[in-house]
Image (tube, grey):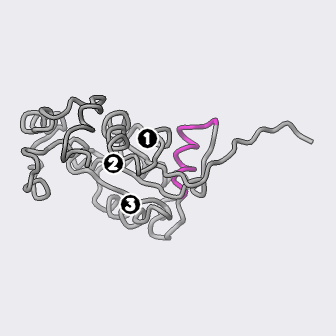
Amino acid sequence: MNNYAVETRRRSRSLLIVEGKHEKNELFWLIFKCFPELNIDINDVWIYGTNIYKLYEDIVREYGNDWAKDRIDVDLPFVISKKEHMETVYYRNDFTNIILVFDYERHDPAFSEEKILEMQHCFEDSTDMGKLYLNYPMIESYLHLKSMPDGEYINRKIPVSLQPGDRYKCLVKSESVLGKFIELPHRIDKLSNTPDICN
């Protein structure tokens, strides 16, 4: 007989892997409050802490340079938890859905269209290896609404010359009408009582 303690695994969990604290503490916190039917525990939102190109490097370190070409079955929860959560290693079969949300990061020195395409091709199913969503140009684009509703939002183009990211953040802050409705992150009571925002 041994005294090993094994953490009981919860099934039917959805894992959301995000780039930073802003995404977890502001955006997804707000989404989960507005849409409780999503049934995602905020503790199942993992902050990766860096960009998509570093994640790509971690996958290469674990599976080799040809992981995408060889169609290797990547276990993202394992790759990330091994690096970020050493006390408890998780595996893909611990989750029913895996969702990745990262910025496009065109200005990053490690930017590679090939890497982005490989990641999009491999991470295309949330119930398998995961589903990748890219923010363009960055996560703040969810705030870039000039009116409510904003019919032009889906076609809005941002010039590549609007770099670094702080310039885009300033543009969003000056053009967004959302600040008039909410003050992120935790004005949820007022938000949930505002028609056409959460319903």
The reply to whether callout 3 and callout 1 are in contact (CB within 8 Å) is no
Furthest residue in direction bottom, as rendered: 70
Task: Count the labels in the image.
Answer: 3
> What is the magenta range?
75-87
Element marked by disc 3: helix
- What is the x, y in percent for residue 61? 52, 51
Label 1 and label 2: CA atoms lie apart by: 10 Å
Q: Is residue 61 left or right of residue 38?
A: right
In-image side of 123 versus 147 (left or right):
right
Which circle's residue, 1 or 2, is located before the other in the chain? 1
Is-magenta flag for residue 80?
Answer: yes
Q: Is disc 1 in contact with disc 2, using a CB cutoff of under 8 Å?
A: yes
Residue in the image at 44% along x and 61% along y: 126
Q: Amino acid at mark 3?
A: Met
Q: Which residue is mark 1?
A: 48
Q: Position of residue 38 (x, y in %)?
A: 41, 51
Where's residue 171, x and y in %?
9, 37
Q: Is residue 160 magenta?
A: no
Viewer-closest of 19 and 83: 19
> Is disc 2 placed on a helix, strand or loop?
strand
Vertical comparison of 88 with 72: above or below: above
Residue 141: quarter of image = top left
Q: Quadrant of residue 83?
A: top right
Front residue of this view, candidates 179 and 165: 179
The kind of residue on which mark 2 rests is Phe
Q: Main secondary structure of the magenta part?
A: helix
Of tags 3 and 1, which is closer to the observer?
A: 1
Residue beneath disc 2: 102
Residue pointed to by mark 3: 119
